Image: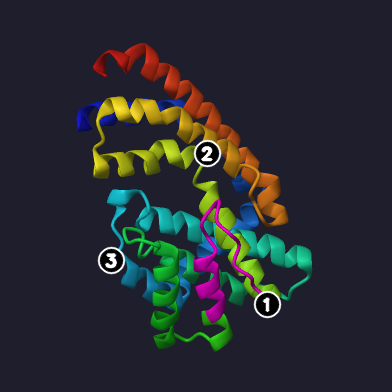
Amino acid sequence: MVTVYTRLQKRARQIVSRYPPPDFYTELSRAFSLSRFSFDTHPTISDLRFYVTQRLEDDFGHGLLHATKVALDAGCLVMAEGERIGYSPRLIKRLMVVVQSAALLHDLKRKEPDHAVRGASFAAVLLGGYPFSIEEREDVRLAILDHEAFKKRVPINSRRGALVSDCLYDADKFRWGPDNFTDTLWLMVFFQDPPFEDFVASFPKGLQSLSRIRETFRTATGRLYGPRFIDIGIAVGDELFEVIKTEFLHLT
């Protein structure tokens, strides 16, 4: 079955390549560049990147590649939202480091039950060895605890903490767009190797989940750009399902 899934991933990537990248990256290019600069150069982020590189595996679709994309987009969101709110450049830079740290760590316990709960507790302890204040460690803990979709929200009383949490959530859910069909879905399938007939039967339900996630973005910037990520994902998924039905259904 891995051969079939490899062929499907290739077709999915061909479909995605026909779509322009989400306009989040063009319209917020300055903020994204500054997020990239922070991610590439800040010593704390560099140390955490080294730490998670030794521990995150891409074989379940939520490894280092996923964490890196979430960190870059979350930093961009923090800058866009921070400027909209009126935060100082210094505070925005600091919040960017906090949210990128949360992003690098948010799926560290992905393969364990209650991964958000376990990951949040682990991150809070881990960051005690890094230059974060008690409040910043709590912001990271709550953001990781509150990053899952379709779950009861975690109360966050700090305005800055809520911003970190919401930006992490939105950046994580951006991945439900085209990234889902270039990488995430296939890494999960390669790991689980389900029977092909089960994969086909569950595909429409997965597309329904994309439609549901479209309405859950939390920040103003996320609500503006997030649905556009998801719309591309839905269009790609619909087209891919037609390919499955016309070219691969005989394999079930």
Tell me the colour scheme of the image.
rainbow
User: Are dots 3 and 2 in contact, CB under 8 Å?
Assistant: no
Would residue 233 be found to the left or right of residue 51 on screen? right
Q: Is mark 1 on a helix, strand or loop?
A: loop
Q: Where is residue 91 in the image (x, y as percent from the top left)?
A: 67, 77
Dominant secondary structure, magenta:
loop
Q: How crowded is mark 3: few (under 14 residues within 10 Å), some or many (20 or more)?
A: few
Q: Quadrant of residue 197?
A: top left
Q: Which residue position is annotated with label 2?
A: 209
Residue reaching furthest to the front: 152
Amino acid marked by disc 3? Arg
Magenta span? 138-157
User: Are dots 3 and 1 in contact, CB under 8 Å?
Assistant: no
Q: Is mark 2 on a helix, strand or loop?
A: helix
Would residue 129 be found to the left or right of residue 187 on screen? right
Q: Which of marks 1 and 2 is nearer the N terminus?
A: 1
Q: Which residue position is annotated with label 1?
A: 158
Q: Which residue position is annotated with label 3?
A: 55
